[in-house]
Each structure stands twice: as C-alpha cells, then as structure tokens.
Amino acid sequence: MQPFTTLSAIAAPLPIDNVDTDMIIPKQFLKTIKRTGLKEGLFYEMRFRVDGSRVDDFVLHNAPYDHAEILVSGANFGCGSSREHAPWALLDFGIRCLIAQSYADIFFNNCFKNGILPIVLPKESIDKLMTAAKDGKKVMVNLGTQTVQAEGQNTPAYAFDIEPFRKHCLMEGLDDIDLTLKKLGEIDAYEARQRELTPWLAA
C-alpha cells in the first residue's frame, strides 16, 4: 500500500449527499476481484447515458478534474452496500483523499484498508473547500499535522481527527497483510513450538 503523508492536488467537487456505493461503482462492474481497470466504471451512471453517450459536463470528464486526487462531497458518502470495489474504483482513478461531512461506516473502514484517507469536516468547512474546488484551486492535505487547506486560503487550515493507529498505517503504507507480515517472526516461532508440542499434527 502506498504511504500517505502529504498531498497537494486538484480537488473535484461533487456537491451531493448520500452518494451510495452503487453510484460509485455500479453492480455490473463487480465481476472482477482485480483492483485495476475499475476506474472505467467509477460513477458510470453519472458519466454516461443509457445509450452509452458521455455526459460531457460531469466533473471528472473535464480538466483539471480528470486528474483529481481529492474528492470533496456531501454527507453520508459511501452509503449502501459494503462493496470494497467502491474504494478500489476511486483509487484506480487516482483519488487518494476524500473530504466529506460524514461517511457510511463500512465504506469508511474500507478506505483506510486501501490507502485512501477519508477526512470528516463540518459543513461550513466543506462548503468553503467546495467553492475552492469549483474554482480549480488545489487543496493541501497534511496527515502528520491533520490539517487541510485550500490554495490561497487566508484563514487557518481546517483540522481533522483521525484514530492514531489508522494514521500510523496510512503514513507507513501498511495494509492488513503488511501488518501480519511484520509479525512473521512471532508467527514462525509459534508454529515451531506447536510442531514440538504436537508433532503428530505436522505429520
């Protein structure tokens, strides 16, 4: 998993509440267990009409937002089903940070497990960042100091909370597998003891 420390990037504005996981990645794209290629289905039903023609004014179709690494949205982002393909699709597009008023719990947890930082801020701060995003300004995120600031922002940076263990894992680039591998010596020692105590199980 790629470490997350600081990020200065274009933020795409998506001023919608209750963006559910079916909106993020529709069910027809859930046939794969690969994490690559899913960007093609990201917000598919918002990007394309039923006949397959492109919705040209959708934000992610237009520069500079077609290279956005941050997404600013409304409340209850990621509600709906628990599909992990939702953060996979966002990450495959290049989104490494989400800023919203609130998130669905399972989606929120899945973001951390896949290297995406989901930031929670109050509506007033979201509205100001949304305006900055619409103006094409970059947004700076510093996980170390737990702050967010828009380019040219004169007011103090917005502070956000994050659980220390999750912060550590993001900054070190540790997913669940990496965390397990860090205990490999202890696992090997335990298995060696088990072979000595119960050799018939290893036969």
Image (tube, rainbow, N blue to C red):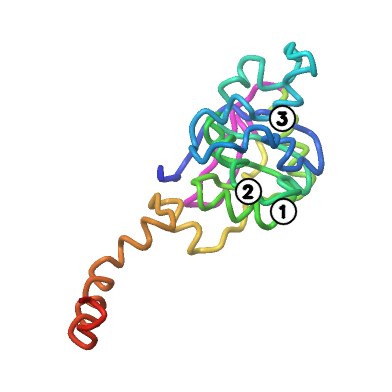
Q: Residues within 10 Å of mark 2 (few under 14, many from 20)?
A: many
Name the residue located 81 percent from the left edge and 41 percent from the top edge: 17
Q: Which residue is mark 1?
A: 104
- Mark number, residue 13: 3
Spatial separation of the CA atoms under disc 1 and disc 3: 19 Å
- Mark 2 = which residue? 119
The disc label shown at residue 6, or none: none
**What's the distance in space between the residues labelled 2 and 1, CA to CA?**
13 Å
Highlighted magenta segment, given as a residue range = 135-153
> Residue at coordinates 59% horizontally, 28% vertically from top-left?
138
| Residue nearest the observer in this picture, 168 or 83 | 83
* Horizontal relation, residue 192 to residue 163: left or right: left
- The disc, 2 or 1, on the residue closer to the chain's N-terminal end is 1
> Decide: marks 2, 3 in contact (CB < 8 A)?
no
Image quarter (top left, top right, bottom left or bottom right) of the C terminus: bottom left
Q: Amino acid at mark 1?
A: Ala
